[in-house]
Structure formats: C-alpha cells, structure tokens
Amino acid sequence: MFISFEGGEGTGKTTLANALFKKMIQKHTVIFTKEPGGCETNLPIRNLLFSSDNKIDVRTEALLYAADRAEHLDKVILPALKKGQIVICDRYIDSSLAYQGYARELGEEFVKKINVIALKTMPDITFYLDLDPQIGLQRIKDKREDKREYFDLQTLSFHQKVRRGFLNLHKQFPQRIFKIDANQPLEEIQSIIETEIQRLFKIKL
C-alpha cells in the first residue's frame, strides 16, 4: 500500500502524514518517508532546493527533484513495497507537476518525461490538502518566521498557481486524489483520512 500526502505550504500535510504513520504503525508494518531527501544520499539535494538563497534555473530545479525521486524509489519506496510494507510519503510526483509543471510553467508533459521512472509506481491514494495560499503562508510565517525556506518566500501568485495545479490534477485523477478542505481542525481531517483508508483498503487502524 502506497499513500502520499500533497498540498501547498502551510496546509498541515506533514503533521497529518506523521499522525497517520503513528496510528498505523501500532497494527501494521509502515514506513514514513518524504520528498525531497527521503534517503540519506539525497540530503544535499534537499538542502540545495530548500535553501533560501536558491538561484538555480527552474529546469535544473525540476531535474533535481526527478533525480531525488528516482533514487528515493530505488532505495526506499520500492524495497518497502516489495516487502509488503505500507509506505506513507510526504510529497511525491504530484508536487513536481504542481510546482514545476504549473507554477514554474514548465508544462505537465516536461515534468512527466523527466519522471518516467516514478510514473510506473504511483500511490494507491493521494490525500490532497486544499487551502487558500494566503492562509497557508500566514501559518508558515507565524510558525517559523526566523527560518523560512525557499518556497515559503515565493510570491502569493506563485502559490496560487501551485494550488490551481493541484486542483487540476484532482480533476484529472479523482479516483486516486482525495481532496480535503484543510481549513478544518487537524483532528477532524485526521478522522476523514482514517475513515477513507479503512473504507478503501478494508483494514482496521
């Protein structure tokens, strides 16, 4: 079982992904991972991409995410799935499509071409946390004003494009991408996620 979490900045997706991991590991064999930097060899890539003074070309940025994902698949995700383990991943290819494909305007096809390896292993379900970017960015500002990362510092217009990208992906893949209004208490969202997993996979949490 492969579960991914997606959303813009400040949607609470990382907190919710961690909460699901802590819940599921009580009864199941589960791993929690993330992108970028889901394996030790990829940490330099994550540090470069998230640096507040990141000035790399947008195509280079997209290629670095694709390289990170290929290594992550090979070293972490695929080995776990082959062992029958449940994988919970904080961001996956949908983030590249929304951020680089839509917001950076590189196009969906370009992103798919450089992520051809990842397209062969898609999540069974993706929880997309949808939120007005203004609210999300304010949450980030309140939480970590002194250590904001590269994407936190992008314009509101950029983040609005990211949201439109995610919403477009949800329209394309409604059976895989489960959209949740992230402007709710985290406890309520967590309950929605757990209910959907039990319904979809017929398992008890």
Image (spheres, grey):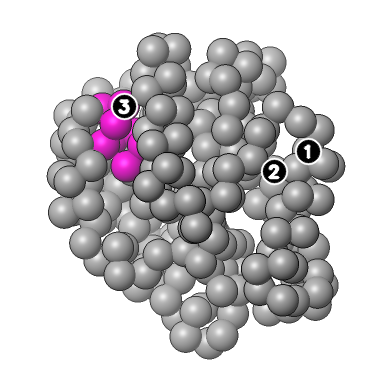
Q: Are marks 2 and 1 in contact (CB under 8 Å)?
A: yes
Instruction: Please report contact status of discs 1 and 3: CB closer than 8 Å, yes or no.
Output: no
User: Residue 48 falls in which quadrant of the image?
Assistant: top left
Amino acid, disc 1? Leu
Rendered residue at 43%/21% (across/down): 159
Q: Disc 2 marks which amino acid?
A: Thr
Asked whether, in this view, residue 52 is left or right of residue 32, the answer is left
Q: Is residue 44 left or right of residue 56?
A: right
Q: Which residue is mark 3?
A: 103
Residue visible at 45% across and 35% down?
A: 167
Reading the image, the residue beneath label 1 is 186
SS class, disc 2: helix
Where is residue 15, by image quadrant? top right
Residue 66 painted magenta = no
Q: Position of residue 36 (x, y in %)?
A: 41, 49
Which circle's residue, 1 or 3, is located before the other in the chain?
Answer: 3
What distance separates the C-alpha of mark 1 from that of mark 3?
27 Å
**Where does the N terminus fall, quadrant-wise?**
bottom right
Chain-order first, disc 3 or disc 2: 2
In the picture of the structure, the residue carrying the numbered disc 2 is 15
Magenta range? 97-104
Q: CA distance from mark 2 to mark 1?
A: 8 Å
Compared to residue 149, the image places residue 28 above or below, namely below
Labels 3 and 2 touching (C-beta < 8 A): no
Element carrying mark 3: helix
